[in-house]
């Protein structure tokens, strides 16, 4: 399935007048506040978020999985699904692949399909947290941190193989997330596990092409509940520094203990030039991987406030890689991703409304009340007309979710793929 411009234009005409009225009103209000609406629209239009291949099908838990009809059963179908998302939103212009599930059979054909859907390939993701068919060694007791050198070598080689796959597709980065850890006190020696991990990451780093980056992800718990080798941003930061200048920390919103000040972590990493990537999701208790902005929208805004400040004031930090990392088994996956993309754009737009100079002036006077008012005034602004206008100017849908349903896209996917297709990757 591939949407064309005429379909989207037809959908936009249904809501065009209402949208125009809302946008003109908001634009007038922002003009009175000396906000540069055109610059904000340009930044929103340029903001692209990668879609992970594993989020296109219904996810699951260790208790069960409830499939969703018309899931993409091949890499080609996954690319087509992301193409639909990008056609509707014009902000999902990249796909992130998970190896070994997304290995192309015909690289040229896959690149042509991605190009036809106006997509590029974002970071490639390795997997050493599950045993795969025909592998000699098991990751039951860890991969890059394993006591057994043969297991570590297998895990390192897998990551190198993933890099080679990414090179053929035009990707420029590798994301490494480890499930390595321990379930019981005394099971592992913390120092040896960390040392083995560092040495393994250095071996992977040495295989990086000159223009590539490696993103080191962290997570405090799960699947191991006593300890995780790379359990927090500090450990990731330390390992990135040990590897070299092409290694960075990756922040996943769900990979934090409750009430962690993520915006402070983001700010610190950007100051040090070591924030490389960002995974969007939301959670209530732990790594719930819920729809972005569905639980903690103000926290997301505060994080974006620090990201916007860092992008303007920390030239030592590279351009960031943005990706959604959410998966569950209740909603239509494509509808969930549309909602997440909308929430991300809204938080970004609100952060762009913050007058950073006014905020710094208030901070310099220790005017705590005014600091809060500046942030909350931006947050309380209904920026949906701005986001919709940025989409429309780029050729996307004014209301992507409404258009998705009106065009009966899920029904079309079911007709093409059947009721029993199952996405790979989870």
Image: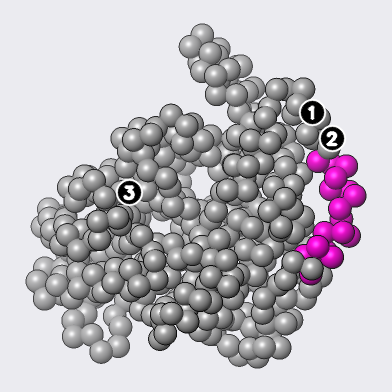
Q: Mark yes or no: residue 363 visible.
A: yes
Which residue is label 1 attached to? 29
Question: Label 1 to label 2, Cα distance in Å?
Answer: 6 Å
Secondary structure state at the residue bearing disc 3: strand
- Residue 73, relative to residue 313: is it above or below? below
Write the start and end of the magenta stretch as one range.
7-23
Mark 1 in CB contact with mark 2 (< 8 angstroms)? yes
Residue drawn at the location 24% of the way across and 46% of the way down: 245
Decide whether residue 258 is among the magenta residues: no
Do labels 1 and 3 touch, CB within 8 Å?
no
Residue in the image at 33% along x and 48% along y: 249
- Image vertical order of residue 86 relative to residue 355, above or below: below
Quadrant assignment for the C terminus: bottom left
Among the two numbered marks 2 and 3 on one chain, the one whose residue lies closer to the N terminus? 2
Residue 25: assigned label = 2
Q: Nearer the viewer, residue 298 or 110?
A: 110
Which quarter of the rendered picture does the N terminus lie within? bottom right
Residue 143 pos. (x, y %): 21, 69
Crowdedness near tag 2: few (<14), some (14–19) or many (≥20) residues, C-alpha within 10 Å: few
* Circle 3 residue: 249
């Amino acid at each position: 399935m591939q949407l064309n411009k005429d379909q989207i234009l037809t959908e936009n005409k249904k809501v065009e007048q209402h949208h125009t009225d809302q946008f003109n009103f908001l634009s007038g209000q922002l003009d009175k506040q000396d906000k540069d609406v055109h610059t904000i629209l340009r930044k929103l239009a340029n903001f692209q978020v990668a879609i992970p291949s594993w989020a296109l099908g219904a996810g699951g838990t260790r208790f069960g999985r409830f499939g969703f009809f018309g899931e993409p059963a091949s890499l080609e179908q996954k690319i087509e699904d992301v193409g639909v998302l990008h056609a509707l939103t014009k902000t999902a212009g990249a796909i992130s692949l998970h190896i070994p599930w997304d290995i192309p059979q015909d690289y040229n054909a896959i690149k042509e399909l991605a190009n036809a859907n106006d997509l590029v390939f974002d970071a490639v993701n390795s997997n050493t947290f599950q045993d795969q068919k025909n592998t000699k060694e098991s990751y039951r007791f860890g991969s890059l941190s394993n006591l057994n050198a043969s297991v570590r070598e297998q895990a390192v080689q897998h990551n190198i193989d993933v890099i080679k796959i990414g090179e053929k597709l035009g990707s420029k980065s590798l994301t490494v997330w480890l499930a390595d850890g321990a379930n019981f006190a005394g099971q592992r020696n913390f120092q040896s596990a960390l040392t083995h991990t560092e040495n393994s990451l250095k071996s992977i780093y040495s295989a990086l092409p000159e223009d590539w980056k490696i993103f080191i992800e962290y997570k405090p718990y799960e699947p191991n509940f006593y300890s995780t080798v790379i359990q927090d941003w500090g450990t990731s930061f330390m390992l990135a520094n040990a590897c070299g200048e092409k290694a960075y920390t990756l922040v996943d919103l769900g990979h934090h203990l409750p009430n962690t000040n993520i915006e402070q972590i983001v700010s610190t990493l950007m100051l040090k030039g070591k924030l490389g990537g960002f995974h969007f999701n939301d959670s209530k208790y732990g790594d719930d991987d819920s729809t972005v902005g569905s639980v903690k929208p103000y926290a997301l805004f505060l994080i974006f406030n620090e990201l916007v400040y860092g992008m303007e004031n920390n030239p030592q930090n590279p351009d960031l890689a943005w990706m959604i990392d959410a998966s569950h088994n209740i909603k239509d996956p494509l509808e969930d991703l549309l909602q997440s993309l909308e929430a991300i754009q809204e938080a970004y737009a609100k952060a762009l409304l913050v007058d950073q100079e006014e905020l710094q002036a208030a901070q310099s006077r220790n005017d705590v009340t005014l600091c809060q008012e500046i942030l909350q005034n931006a947050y309380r602004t209904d920026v949906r007309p701005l986001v919709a206008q940025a989409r429309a100017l780029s050729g996307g849908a004014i209301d992507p979710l409404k258009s998705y349903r009106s065009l009966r896209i899920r029904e079309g996917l079911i007709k093409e793929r059947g009721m029993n297709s199952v996405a790979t990757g989870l």
